[in-house]
Image (spheres, rainbow, N blue to C red):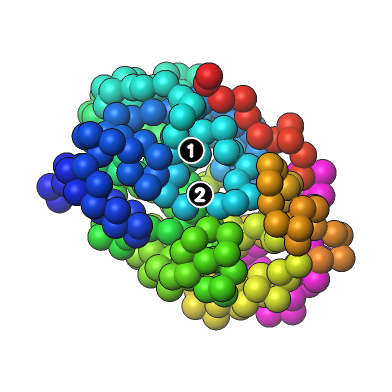
Amino acid sequence: MPVLENMEKCRLCPRNCNIDRNEKAGYCGVGDKIKIGRAAPHYWEEPFISGERGSGTVFFSGCSLRCVFCQNKKISGGELGRTVSVEELAEIYLSLEASGVHNVNLVTATHYTDKVAESIVLAKKRGCKLPFLWNSSGYEHVETMKRLDGLIDIYLPDMKYHSSEISKKYSNCPDYFEVTKKAISEMRRQTGTLFVKNGLLKFGTVVRHLVLPTYTEDSKKIIEYLYSTYGDSIYISIMSQYVPFGSVPDELNRRITEDEYNEVVDFAMSLGVKNAFIQERESAAESFIPDFFE
């Protein structure tokens, strides 16, 4: 594993804020200490991730994307959560394993990549046998992803936007698509082709796309890109669970309609996509958003 940088001039994510996170919070909203918002079995991931016993999910506080419609705003700003050390984080993985979950699911950990990598190595040395998932916005540096090579078994990135205008408007990153497509390419390189055993994913890349109200054409461009680039060597998860939270622009201040979602799913089918997940509209409920540490 390559030598990991400190946080004196942090460039772990594409924001490249160069802030000394030993002294103050970066763009991600957190400093150099690991903060987590929740660690528990989670049952609402894709079926071959949650299985019957759940995915051992660790939600990290802070986020380098900060979408205006974020469903985890309670922790994405970095204010909420409890501080843990690398050693404690490794023990959390082992405790989750003992509870019977199928994997360890690291949600929005990019801004802690160096320390999370250390915690995975430590947990493996202490006997952890579970697959590790990297569950992120997709907005990642390729070089940061290379630090995880050999440590992550399953990548679960988003691909939120194709249009730079839309990504700038809602996440303040006009380079989102260009950056994310390179990151996903690296993720796919690391995990290789999909490997499913006894109904559970052991290795592979699953790209999620949340369909937003109004923007079905952008959704189609993402799915067309993914399928033309990777075919059925990855899974594409087409998500219907958008729920407006807080103060969002008028065009996003509603759930997607059944017609909008079906339009995107039908387009994927017309391309010949086989490895895809679709959601029932009942998924769009606040009950699917977990309780976080205060």
The image quadrant that residue 225 belongs to is bottom right
Q: Is the magenta stretch mostly helix, strand or loop?
A: helix
Residue found at the far left of this picture: 3
What residue lies at 46% left-to-right and 58% top-to-bottom?
138
- Would you say 247 lies left or right of 197 here? right
Answer whether residue 11 is visible to the viewer in this image.
yes
| Circle 1 crowding by C-alpha within 10 Å: few under 14, some 14–19, many from 20 | some
- The segment highlighted magenta reads 261-283
- Would you say 69 lies left or right of 26 here? right
Q: Which of 255 and 113 is in front in this view?
A: 255
Residue 45, image x, y percentages: 62, 42
Q: How far apart are marks 1 and 2 (CA)?
A: 8 Å
Residue 95, image x, y percentages: 42, 19
Q: Which mark is residue 66?
A: 2
Q: Is residue 244 magenta?
A: no
What residue lies at 58% left-to-right and 60% top-to-bottom?
170
Q: Do the residues labelled 1 and 2 touch (CB within 8 Å)?
A: yes
Query: In this picture, is 17 found above or below 177?
Result: above
Name the residue type under label 2: Arg
Query: In this picture, is 68 found above or below 286?
Result: below
Q: Residue 106 carries which label?
A: none
| Circle 2 crowding by C-alpha within 10 Å: few under 14, some 14–19, many from 20 | many
Helix, strand or loop under label 1: loop
Q: Which mark is residue 77?
A: 1
Helix, strand or loop under label 2: loop
Q: Which of 79 and 125 is in front in this view?
A: 79
Residue 240, image x, y percentages: 74, 54
Name the residue type under label 1: Gly
Answer whether residue 206 is visible to the viewer in this image.
no
What residue lies at 82% left-to-right and 44% top-to-bottom?
282
Residue 167, image x, y percentages: 54, 66
